[in-house]
Amino acid sequence: MHRRQSLAGADEVLGKSVYRGVHANHPALEAARDGIVIPGHVEGTVSAEEHNAGGASSRSPFTSWTRSLQIAECYTKRTGPGGVVLRVHIDAPPPGVSWSWEWSPDIFGESEVLLRGIRKGVEVFGHADLETGTRPSIEER
Amino acid sequence: MLTWKRELARRLKSAEASESLAVARSFLSEPDLRLVSGHSHKVRASEALTLWKARFEISAAITHQPIDGAKLLIEKLVALDPDAELEQFPLTGSQRAGSLFFEAVDGGFVGAVVVDRLEAEAQATA
């Protein structure tokens, strides 16, 4: 069954935090350090289902987020130290913005939600090492 | 039989017998399987390794939702040239979902990852 819809169960997650692990070799790491989230291809036609299946991120208008900080940390550390964890609250997009939340089939049970588009002003919640020394590490939380 | 299903069956027929091949064949026998978005896509071996290693670790340590074939796929990906191009076929059905991977250059079977959707939904609602 192919489904594309707004975030399912949005009422249950509104106002709650979701996290994104950006690993050290990620092409959008520098933007992430500045609190900017950029998908692989903002005008890409990859579906939520295809994005969730994996291997399509570079062509996708989505970025992956999870309700689990623990899972985000695993994604942050997957290419070694230097990655960051981002955090936002699930809220309805204000008028005029180009981003939106979208439902994920989440077939791997990673509490995934998808963000479509570019989003700025995201909180840099932690990083996977102490190299920069300017932000609290994940382990310190 | 659908064109993509026939093509996958042909490729698996020429693959060497292995545990990974058994996972792929079993998955492909699902009656209502469909190709996600109607097409395969290309992915570099190094990118696939990074993703599936993370998903395997998350599966083992956090979600406890088994991903059949993931460990075998990772072992195969480690041995490949990181720049090798793979063809990934994401598939989904009412019971199971996952992907089959082949080398883009010659169609050689690389591996498969499969999850039980019903088990996943049961865990999500537990």
Image (spheres, grey):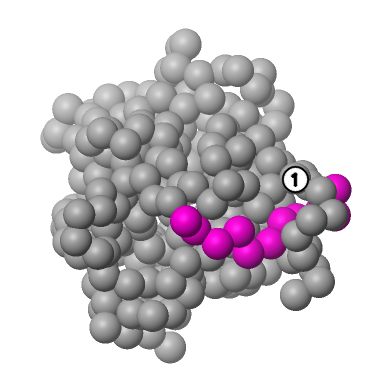
The residue that label 1 is drawn on is A82
Q: Magenta segment, which residues? A: A121-131
Instruction: Quadrant for the N terminus of chain A, please.
Output: bottom left
Number of marks in the rendered image = 1
Q: Residues within 10 Å of mark 1 (few under 14, many from 20)?
A: some
Residue with the most extreme bottom position: B126
- Reply yes or no: does residue A122 show up in magenta: yes
Residue at image x 26%, y 33%?
A43
User: A61 or B125: nearer the eye?
Assistant: A61
Residue at image x 36%, y 57%?
A114
Q: Position of residue A40 (x, y in %)?
A: 41, 35
Q: Position of residue B103 (x, y in %)?
A: 49, 20
Residue under mark 1: which chain is it in?
A
In the visual, does B12 lie left or right of B32?
Answer: right
Compared to residue B97, the image places residue A110 above or below, namely: below
Instruction: Quadrant for the C terminus of chain A, please.
Output: bottom right
